Structure formats: structure tokens, C-alpha cells
Amino acid sequence: MYVPFFLLSGSLAKIDSVHALPPGEIKAIFAKLPAASVAVVGDFCLDAYWMIDPAAAEISLETGLPTRPVCQQRYAPGGAGNVVMNLIALNMASVIPVGVVGDDLFGRELCRLLDQRRINRGNLLIQAANWQTQTYIKPHLDRSEMERIDFGNLNVLEEATAGRLLERIDAVLKCVSVVIINHQVAGSMHNSETLRRGLARLMEENRAVRFIVDSRGYHEAYPRAFHKLNEAEVMKAGGSPVAAGTNLSLEELLPRARLLKRRRWPRVRIRSRRSTSQIWRRR
């Protein structure tokens, strides 16, 4: 059994060994999780699944086009919300979400789902203007997903909201040992330079807290954090983008990882898609 990511740290030029964590060590790690307190700062989204049954379709009198009857609907937290749900499932001692939602029905549904799990959402701020809860409508026809409908891609985080977020994050840092920074959508709160600079400053001021960044475009903004990247993100960050799904060897990844090291990314974790992944360490 292997831990599912590459660990590239220290002097990447001197990686010369492969180490697979044995099951006993993995169990020991998981045994410590109930004592951990984690904050999740990021893009809280809602995933919506609409199942369409064309058997009940009719022609719209207004448009003359066939309707798309929805026979079933299901909603689930996505993005940073999904991270929170996974951490709750791992029985963490405390999981604190920090982010922004809109004053809309999707934001209320997301909050309802978090309330069902008794998650303290007091640090999920509401921005009424220029912000839609990031929602991804996924219509399905005959068990196949159709074109997705996205809400929130044009979001703009207001300066006042960025300031309030930084105040909340600063307060939360006093009661957690780990902070996960999540960025994965177009209309992200991380698009705010005020937020990025303030968060980077808080990382410098709170060196006892471990920060883990999973970002689609702002790794450079958080040089003091641990960086979690998948293989394609490593190649893109290293200046050699590849098509999605491309199989990459360690020999192809290492030069790009070393480049990230030279760019002052001292802590890099590369998530591999391979089922027999390994941890690569410097001796």
C-alpha cells in the first residue's frame, strides 16, 4: 500500500531513494487525526445534480422549444465545502470553514447542508453585491452529464469583505494547527490582491501553524506554505503545460519540481494519479 502522492522536499537535486509508507505507519497517522484542529480557507461551492427525464417533456408555449423536465435533484458541498466534509469524515477534532457565499438560494442551501453536519459556519461571510455563491449545475440525461451551468465566475471580492476575511482568519489561527488554503474556481476570493497579500502576511506571522495550499493559479502568492500540486499543475508551473490526462514519468516531473524549488517554493507535494504511487524522499 502506498500513500497517494509524491513528496518532493529538501534538495530536489539529491532525491535518491523511494520509500513506501507501510500500513502500520499509515494507521498511526490516521490515529492522530481526531486530535487535529484544521481551518479551511477557500472557495465554498455547491454542486447541483439535476436528472432530466425527456419522457415528460413538452413544447414551451413561450419559446416553441422542448422543455427539460427534472425528475430528481441533489445538492452537495463542493470546492472547499467538499474538503470540510472529508475532514469531518476523518473525525478531526475541529474543522473551521472560512470563506464567502452570496445572498442567494444556493448560498442558503450550502449553509443548510453544513448545518446538517453541525459545522460551525460563523466564519462564512455573506457578500450581497457582486457575489454569487459558486454553484455548478450538472444536468444529466441518460446518465451522462450535459453542459454545465456555472454561477459565480464573475465574482468580485469587495475590499471590505477581504478585510473582514483577514480578521476572521487571524482569529481562527489562534485555535488551529493546520490551515488548508483552497483555490479552484474562476471567480475565487483569492483573485483579490488584498486578500492574497494579507494571507501571506499572516503566514509569516504565524510560523507555528502549517499552511497547505491547493491552488489553480496562486501558488506564487504563498511562498511560506506547503504546496500540493497534481502532475499537470507541476508541468504548467514549470513552463511546460501538458494536456489533461497525460501520463508523466518521475524523470519528466523532477526537473520541473527542481525549478519550483529554485523559485522559492521550499515545500512541494505532488499528487500522482497512479494507483501505485510512492513517496520520494531525500536521504
Image: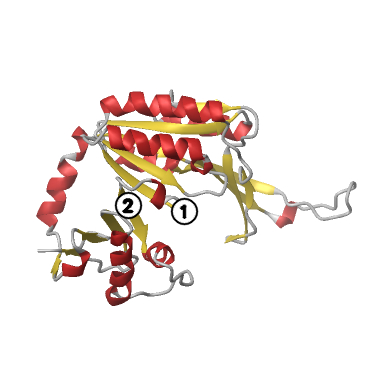
Mark 2 neighbour class, 10 Å CA radius: few under 14, some 14 to 19, many 20 or more = many
On screen, residue 68 above or below 33:
below
In this rendering, the count of numbered labels is: 2
The amino acid on which the numbered mark 1 sits, given as a three-letter code, is Gly
* Image-based side of 204 in relation to 66, left or right: left
Q: Earlier in the sequence, mark 1 or mark 2?
A: 1
The amino acid on which the numbered mark 2 sits, given as a three-letter code, is His
Reading the image, the residue beneath label 1 is 217
Q: Quadrant of residue 246?
A: bottom left
- Quarter of the figure with the N terminus: bottom left
Coordinates of residue 148 in the picture (x, y in percent): 62, 54
**Which circle marks residue 227 in the picture?**
2
Taking the image as drawn, is residue 178 in sight? yes
Q: Residue at 44% across / 50% down in the picture? A: 218
Q: Quadrant of residue 127?
A: top right
Q: Residue at 66% across / 53% down in the picture? A: 52
Q: Residue at 35% across / 74% down in the picture? A: 248
Give the structural element (helix, strand or loop) at label 2.
Answer: strand
* Image-based side of 245 in relation to 251, left or right: right
Q: Nearer the viewer, residue 269 or 138?
A: 269
Coordinates of residue 12 in the picture (x, y in percent): 21, 65
Coordinates of residue 86 in the picture (x, y in percent): 35, 43
